[in-house]
Image (cartoon, rainbow, N blue to C red):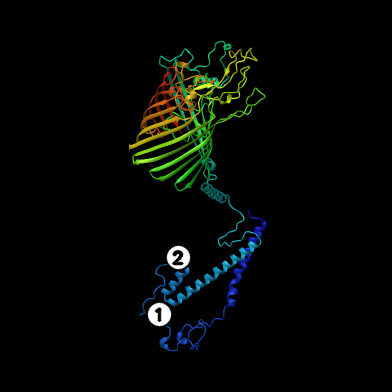
Amino acid sequence: MLTPNQVWRRTYACLTASLLAALQPSLMFAAEPDLPAPLPLLAENAPPAPAAATGTSPSTPAPISADPAEAVPVLPDPNAAPPQPILNTPSQNVTLNLINRLVQKGILTHGEASDLIKGAEEDAAFAKAQAQALAETQAAVAAQTAMPPVQPDAEEVRVTYIPESVKAQIRDQLRTEVFEQARAQHWAAPGSVPEWTQRIKMFGDVRMMYQGFNYPTGNDNTTGAFPNFNAINSGQPFNFGVDNLGLIPPQLNVDKSRDTYLLRMRLGFDIDLEDGFTAGIRFASGSSNTPVSTNQAMAAAGPGGQGGQGGNFSKYELWLDRAFIKYEASLTADTDVAVFLGRFDNLFMTSSEIMWDEDVALDGAAFKLKSTWNPGFKTWLSGGAFAVFNSALNFPDNSTTKGQSYDKYLFAAQFGVEFKITDDIEGKMSLAYYDWENIEGRFSSPFVPASVNDNGDTDNSRPLFAQKGNTYRKIRNITPTAGASPGGNLNGTVAQFQYFGLATKFRQIAWAGRLDFNHLRPLQVSLLGEFVKNVGLDQTAMQNLNRADPVVNNRSGGTGNWEGGDTAWYMGVNVGKPYTLFNERGNWNMGIGYRYVESDAVVDGFTDSNFGGGGTNMKGYTISAAMALSKATAIRLSYMAAAQIAGPTLRSDVLMFDLTAKF
């Protein structure tokens, strides 16, 4: 709505324009010179005109000849050719059509008609220039007064009343224009969502699984040869003294078959932060917060008794499984770099799960540098530093004297290549080095624990999660002291509250490779291989059973020489479309593989959680088959036969069947 000031200014401008338009003819005629007297109708009655002087104005009329032969006839010559129109076809301009008619009737000649048209065009140009000058003057005045200029509008109609129908039409037109602009600029529109939501991609999957553990006869289940070190280390220290009423430490199940029903739910978000930054978040189910499994045991607390209260239709927990920020940039036209910070997927290449379970995430900072040398040859370099464990702020809780911080880290680097041998044969391989700092257990300073709540100064060196297979030794240096508790332990026979740590360092060299044959696309045949060597293992120290902290497991007969090893390898063949790439009904895959994982080749807490019930010191084969039921659902059947390598006899068969739906 116009303000009163704007209404007054526009009214004044209209009155000024009207006055100038009314005065314009007078001003123009006042400037015109006197016109000559009109010519007589008949040429023969006209007096002779004076001769034109040299240099006279072009506007002076030409003299009329007195020669009768040159007189202009009043009537047209009947024998003359009919006059030709100036226009070949009628025009939409009324003035041009009128002049054309006058020429056709012989009233005007072509020359006269041309003069008339030229004059009319000059008048129109003059009027246009005058209007433009007026508009420029108004704009200058408006600019000086900081008021919006008044634009002349020949079609403007002023009314004091606007009908409701016209108002509705104006509203509809404005609404349409606003919505069109909103849709174009993505800031608002019916049925649309805010722009920031378009930068978030949601994904996830749901899986239902049956898992059966079967133990053949012959496993040693009577001598306590399979202590559950994870249960000991994740709870209170176990008292191995005679005052513990003859109880044995927690043991692994090695002879009673189990049927377990599992579910898995994962929900994640990829977030585009623009300018090369992205973020990732994923939530996952799980019977506990273990790093190697997102399975939730239905109607139970979890495999191996892990997790909290369960069963009786209890609800299940949801864990934060991934949370990271990622930055990507192009260093050159052929080289890209990605930097990760937080908790993210394992970025190191593997061909199996002999070292890394597929569910393991890494906590820390990492990078990946990829270079394309030509279409058939690419390289990458990955590396990072990852926090494995940091001491609690108040450790030890039950003491006024706090212990030194004991922190564990993994430093790793991997170099890999991708290459094409032919258009249908592709290869990929990598070489990595893993350096685990402070992951091995350390023997404490001598002390006498008075109760289960007393802490040793190296208690943090024990692993807080393990599966089975690694070699362990005691980490508490409990001094034999005469007398009973609280000041003594009867010369080491009572109050033997003990924890266990890994018996060796871990520094590994790992090679992984695969060769893909794609002659029958989309059918693919892949040869897979992986090899790991723990160069940090000291065979001499492991065999020294006379030291104060000798190894306590992976010994022949349970008490003999140490029989463990430092090597792991895998070989396998897959046929069909890779399971992770299933995208339509009918996709299928079959695979068979064999592994040999010695006791201390890899950290048992991060290796495959299904083969042999999880962990190391196992050998055997795996057979699997999978098929897609639709674009987003697939079934898979797997069978694993495992046998322990060192120590007492332990064999197990695992059968798994699952249905997975992804979105």
Mark before the other along the chain sequence, 2 or 1: 1
Q: In screen coordinates, is 528 left or right of 344?
A: left
Residue at coordinates 63% horizontally, 66% vertically from top-left? 16
Q: In screen coordinates, is 61 left or right of 523?
A: right
The relative height of residue 298 versus residue 177 in the rendered view (above or below) is above
Whether residue 194 appears in this view of the structure is: no
Q: Horizontal and vertical percent for residue 158?
A: 60, 58
Q: Which residue is mark 2?
A: 92
Q: Nearer the viewer, residue 551 or 460?
A: 551
**Dot in front, 2 or 1:** 2
Q: Nearer the viewer, residue 245 or 519?
A: 245
Q: Horizontal and vertical percent for residue 242?
A: 57, 11
Q: Which residue is mark 1?
A: 76
Q: Nearer the viewer, residue 5 or 658?
A: 658
Q: Secondary structure at mark 2?
A: loop
What's the amino acid at mark 2? Gln
Q: Secondary structure at mark 1?
A: loop
Please tell me how crowded label 1 is: few (under 14), some (14-19), or many (20+) other residues with Cα within 10 Å: some
Q: Horizontal and vertical percent for residue 571?
A: 38, 29
Q: Locate residue 27: give its quadrant.
A: bottom right
Whether residue 634 appears in this view of the structure is: yes
Q: Which mark is residue 402?
A: none
The relative height of residue 443 versus residue 523 in the rendered view (above or below) is above
Q: Residue furthest top?
A: 245
Q: Nearer the viewer, residue 635 or 539?
A: 539
Q: Locate residue 114: give its quadrant.
A: bottom left
